[in-house]
Image (cartoon, rainbow, N blue to C red):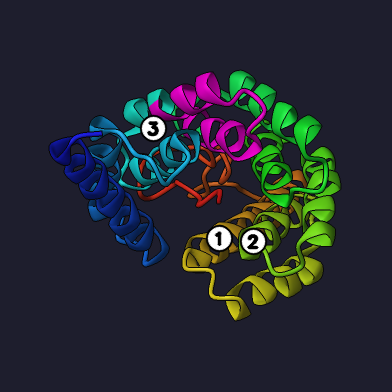
Amino acid sequence: MGFFQRFNNNSSDAHAKRGLQASEADDYHTAAQELAQALEAGVTRYDAAELYTALGKAYERINQLERSVMSCRKAIELKPGYCPAWNNLGIALQYQGNLDEAERCYERAIALKPDYASPYTGLGAVYIARQDAARAIEVLRKAVKLNPQLAVAHSNLAVALSMQGDYAAAAQELQAAISMGYKDWRKVSDRIEALKAWEEVRVRFESGGTSAGVAADPWQDVSSTGDSGRFNLN
């Protein structure tokens, strides 16, 4: 190996290291830039599939979903049995509104590593988007059992429980997520309050009152990729 090739490899590995550090610090713009540079130049000390998976996550977090999908697919091409790549691909596809393919990705991730909590969390979010609270609760309870410190699993479980009208249990799960540092808790809290208000008005309407001024379905954009409706899935 010549000097310049060694220099380029050392430089690309340095980009990879900085990219992973930026991702750990939630600086996803820097992470995407550094990881993309590392992979373009070629790395020697890092697994390329794992870097593509991290790059896919970084792109997803900065809402570059098509690039996220492409990066995760590249990771799977390099390492078909790499569970986190399938999970991250599911997240990106879900944010694109492709629930069916996202569901298949989560199921593939679970088949590869049944004790990995994250794909159960994403699968629960798919069921929430489909208004299937019972199935969502089932898989989200599995996620919480596998990883009790996974804040987003508690948050998604709060959503599913509130859809079934179990607001006390939902409050407990949301509080657990908050105690673990979950950042999007206000969005979840607002949706739960909206659902409670909708339920109250629906009951009044069925008793002969009115439903004026209340949205028909407070969960209709639960899988939205917009900032107002998007839930963090990982």
Q: What element carries label 3?
A: helix
> Where residue 206 sits in the image (x, y, percent)?
76, 44
Tell me if 226 is positioned left or right of 230 in this view: left
> Where residue 92 sits in the image (x, y, percent)?
47, 33
Q: What element carries label 2?
A: helix
| Residue type at the position of mark 1 | Val
Q: How far apart are marks 1 and 3 (CA)?
A: 25 Å
Q: Give the mark nearest the N terminus, 1 or 3.
A: 3
Q: Give the mark nearest the N terminus, 2 or 3.
A: 3
Q: Is residue 145 above or below residue 198?
A: below
Q: How crowded is mark 2: few (under 14 residues within 10 Å), some or many (20 or more)?
A: many
Question: Does the CB distance between marks 1 and 3 fall below 8 Å?
Answer: no
Reading the image, the residue beneath label 2 is: 155
Q: Is residue 77 magenta?
A: yes
Q: Give the mark nearest the N terminus, 1 or 2.
A: 2
Q: Which residues are the magenta region?
A: 71-93
Residue pictured at 76% horizontal, 67% vertical: 148
Residue pictured at 63% horizontal, 19% vertical: 100
Reading the image, the residue beneath label 3 is: 68
Q: Is the magenta stretch mostly helix, strand or loop?
A: helix
Pick whichever, 73 or 17, lies toward us: 17
Question: Does the CB distance between marks 1 and 2 fall below 8 Å?
Answer: yes
Q: How far apart are marks 1 and 2 (CA)?
A: 7 Å
| Residue type at the position of mark 2 | Ser
Tell me if 221 is positioned left or right of 61 in this view: right
Q: Is residue 138 above or below residue 194?
A: above
Q: How far apart are marks 2 and 3 (CA)?
A: 24 Å
Reading the image, the residue beneath label 1 is: 188
Residue pictured at 61% horizontal, 76% vertical: 180
> Where residue 194 sits in the image (x, y, percent)?
56, 57
Q: Report the quarter where the N terminus lies.
A: top left
Q: Is residue 233 magenta?
A: no
